[in-house]
Image (spheres, rainbow, N blue to C red):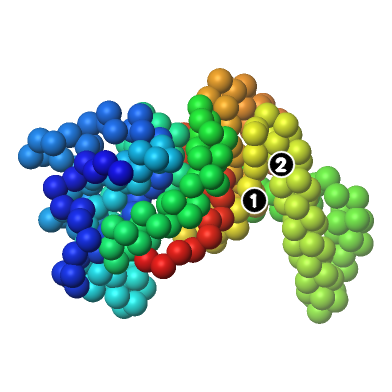
């Protein structure tokens, strides 16, 4: 095993642990972030730069930096203000490694108490890691999200759904009865909207999946999380061959063009490291 770091030996120092960002192939060692200069990229702990361990025997590089394990307390890991900037550093490191090598990102706050613990984990999962790195070579993850302007979608359904049109045509002039009938119409519009949104989601998935190597359905997020007023109705992640990105984006653009009048808005972003296409690795003792 060869090392590229100023401080990676096993230590009894309880104030130091190894924070893992990603696993990659040896070509990543040419990346600027592993330069031996004084301006090396700081890790999630600003006192320690990003470094790497090259496991020569199996041809895998572990990208890491040192941290104080006490900083990753349960209270800090529940504090969005504390997590936010460190998660951005984590993502930035993984993306920079991705520029020179296929990469398998690991979860935020993956920590090993010693170098030997990390080495044992990588050795134990070596075959699976190498296979996965081969599978994501020359590929990247792209996300596609679909949002709907609910007011516009409800108006479209009111004008085009025969059942809703019939209920609307028969509405009473009597205030009390009219109120009850309008409540029934509103319920029917909401049901139709949910059915329509589900249909859109299925159509988008069916249209895009043939152009991807892999697809993962992600959870839908509320406006409070997305920062958008529209309702999210589709959230998918796609693993794409780099050579297929333009074709994939043209399909998304076509779907967007055809759906303009329905209040649909699509968002396609990437390339990202293959966060949702990494294998599940067997745990070993950190």
Q: Could you tell me which residue is drawn at 7 percent across and 39 percent down?
A: 38
Q: Quadrant of the C terminus?
A: bottom left
Q: Is residue 269 left or right of residue 70?
A: right
The secondary element bearing badge 2 is classed as: helix
Q: Is residue 42 left or right of residue 95?
A: left
Decide which of 230, 74 is in the foreground and name it: 74
Residues at badges 2 and 1 in contact (C-beta under 8 Å)?
Answer: yes
To which residue does mark 1 refer?
217
Residue 205: image tag: 2
- Crowding at dot 2, Cα within 10 Å, few <14 / some 14-19 / many 20+, comes out as some
Q: Residue furthest left?
A: 38
Q: Could you tell me which residue is drawn at 63 percent across and 47 percent down?
A: 216
Note whether 131 is above or below 99 in the view shown: below
Mark 2 or mark 1: whose residue is earlier in sequence: 2
Residue 102 percent across, percent down from the top left: 45, 34
Residue at mark 2 to residue at mark 1: CA–CA distance: 9 Å
Q: Could you tell me which residue is drawn at 85 percent across and 49 percent down?
A: 161
Q: Is residue 130 left or right of residue 17?
A: right
Q: Is residue 83 visible?
A: no
Q: Is residue 273 visible?
A: yes
Residue 34 percent across, percent down from the top left: 22, 37
Decide which of 5, 188 is in the foreground and name it: 5
Q: Could you tell me which residue is drawn at 56 percent across and 39 percent down?
A: 131
- Crowding at dot 1, Cα within 10 Å, few <14 / some 14-19 / many 20+, comes out as some
The secondary element bearing badge 1 is classed as: strand
Residue 164: image tag: none
Asked which quadrant contains residue 245, the reply is top right
Decide which of 149, 158 is in the foreground and name it: 149
Q: Quadrant of the N terminus?
A: top left
Q: Is residue 119 left or right of residue 179?
A: left
Decide which of 73, 131 is in the foreground and name it: 131
Residue 266 percent across, percent down from the top left: 58, 39
């Amino acid at each position: 095993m060869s090392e590229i770091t100023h401080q990676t030996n096993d230590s009894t120092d309880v104030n130091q642990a190894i924070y893992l960002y990603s696993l990659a192939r040896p070509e990543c060692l040419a990346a600027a972030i592993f330069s031996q200069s004084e301006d090396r990229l700081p890790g999630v702990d600003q006192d320690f730069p990003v470094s790497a361990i090259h496991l020569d025997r199996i041809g895998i590089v572990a990208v890491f930096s040192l941290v104080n394990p006490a900083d990753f307390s349960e209270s800090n890991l529940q504090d969005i203000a504390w997590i936010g900037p460190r998660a951005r550093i984590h993502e930035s490191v993984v993306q920079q490694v991705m520029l020179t090598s296929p990469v398998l990102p690991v979860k935020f706050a993956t920590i090993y108490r010693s170098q030997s613990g990390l080495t044992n984990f990588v050795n134990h999962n070596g075959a699976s890691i190498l296979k996965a790195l081969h599978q994501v070579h020359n590929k990247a993850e792209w996300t596609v999200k679909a949002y709907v302007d609910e007011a516009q979608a409800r108006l479209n359904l009111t004008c085009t759904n025969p059942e809703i049109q019939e209920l609307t045509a028969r509405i009473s002039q009597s205030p009390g009865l009219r109120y009850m009938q309008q409540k029934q119409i509103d319920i029917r519009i909401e049901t139709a909207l949910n059915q329509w949104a589900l249909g859109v989601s299925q159509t988008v998935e069916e249209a895009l999946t043939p152009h991807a190597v892999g697809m993962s359905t992600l959870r839908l997020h509320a406006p409070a999380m997305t920062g958008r007023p529209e309702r999210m109705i589709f959230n998918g992640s796609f693993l794409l061959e780099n050579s297929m990105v333009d074709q994939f984006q043209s399909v998304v653009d076509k779907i967007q063009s055809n759906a303009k009048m329905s209040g649909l808005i699509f968002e396609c972003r990437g390339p990202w490291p293959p966060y949702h296409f990494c294998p599940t690795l067997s745990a070993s003792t950190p």
